[in-house]
Image (cartoon, rainbow, N blue to C red):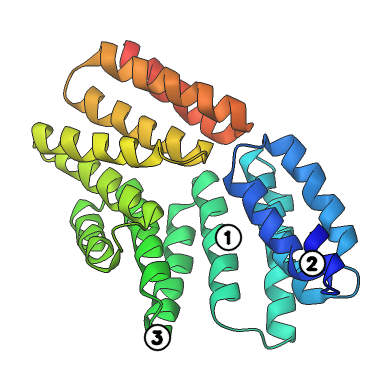
Amino acid sequence: MEYYERAGWPPSICCPKIAAALYHGPVAAPKAIRRCRELVGRVGADRVGEAGVLVFLGGLVAMRGQFTQARELLSSARTTYEELHVTGVLVGVCDSIRAKAEMLAGKYEAAETILRATCELYDELGEHSHFATQAGALAEALYSQGRLEDASELCRRCAERAASDDLSAQILWRSVSAKVNAREGEAAQAEVRVREAVDLAARTDALNWNGEALLDLAEVLRLDDRPGEAAAAAEEALDLFTQKGNSVAMRRAGELLHLARL
């Protein structure tokens, strides 16, 4: 931000990038929300810059379980893009966060609808990296509905398009395919894949990525009738979600921890 201003560039160009780091990174959600609200005040009259911040503010608010407010923020950003005829990746990013918010709310069919449209958008644009990540997210939405065959197909498409250093996509297809494998009784392959996902996530400071991969490990281990190890993984995930202030994911981790201990 400082260099943008010193170079004479409007800070509004930088604000959405800072908001993205606050959303994905290790800053706790309550603090990240406050900082995003401050960024909204920095963008001035730049409506595209404001929308870019609102996208990630909406995603952070969703982590706190405030889904009505999250939808309002995300809808406002989406409307701004439509009014200003903004297309392409910015709209795709907005819709990916909208889908994630719906996933947190347990609205998996709504998330699926958004993600299918987002995948089609990126496919048309030839954006292989963005497509891969959204295909992985779509696989998770399908798995959450019990549609294992469809989820497996999206994992395959994600793996085909994902670059070797595209960590978000590489984590997603491994995690979801591991859970599918576990449901189908392929415990050994499931554990290998999900532990690869955990290791990839550990290269980053994205607490949600790390927590979600560990929660998927806990699910795989629970399905393999290894409750002690499953509980340990769920506890580790719970700690990471607590650090992030992701109260919705904290509840999910707590529920899985309870199941593992039964």
Disc 2 packing (10 Å; few <14; some 14–19; many ≥20): few
Mark 1 belongs to which amino acid?
Answer: Arg
Can you see residue 145?
A: no
Mark 2 belongs to which amino acid?
Answer: Tyr
> Badge 2 is on which residue?
4
Spatial separation of the CA atoms under disc 3 and disc 1: 20 Å
Mark 3 belongs to which amino acid?
Answer: Glu
> Badge 3 is on which residue?
124
**Is there a contact, CB below 8 Å, between mark 2 and mark 3?**
no
Name the residue rendered at 28%, 68% in the picture. Answer: 161
Q: Position of residue 124 (x, y in %)?
A: 39, 86
Relative placement, left or right, of 208 versus 219 is right
Can you see residue 245?
A: yes
Q: Position of residue 200 (x, y in %)?
A: 34, 42
The image quarter containing residue 73 is bottom right
Work out whether residue 30 or residue 262 is closer to the camera in this orientation and state it: 30
Spatial separation of the CA atoms under disc 2 and disc 1: 29 Å
Relative placement, left or right, of 32 versus 254 is right
**Is there a contact, CB below 8 Å, between mark 2 and mark 1?**
no
Q: Nearer the viewer, mark 3 or mark 1?
A: 3
> Badge 1 is on which residue?
98
Q: Nearer the viewer, mark 2 or mark 3?
A: 2
Check the image and report above or below for 164 versus 119: above
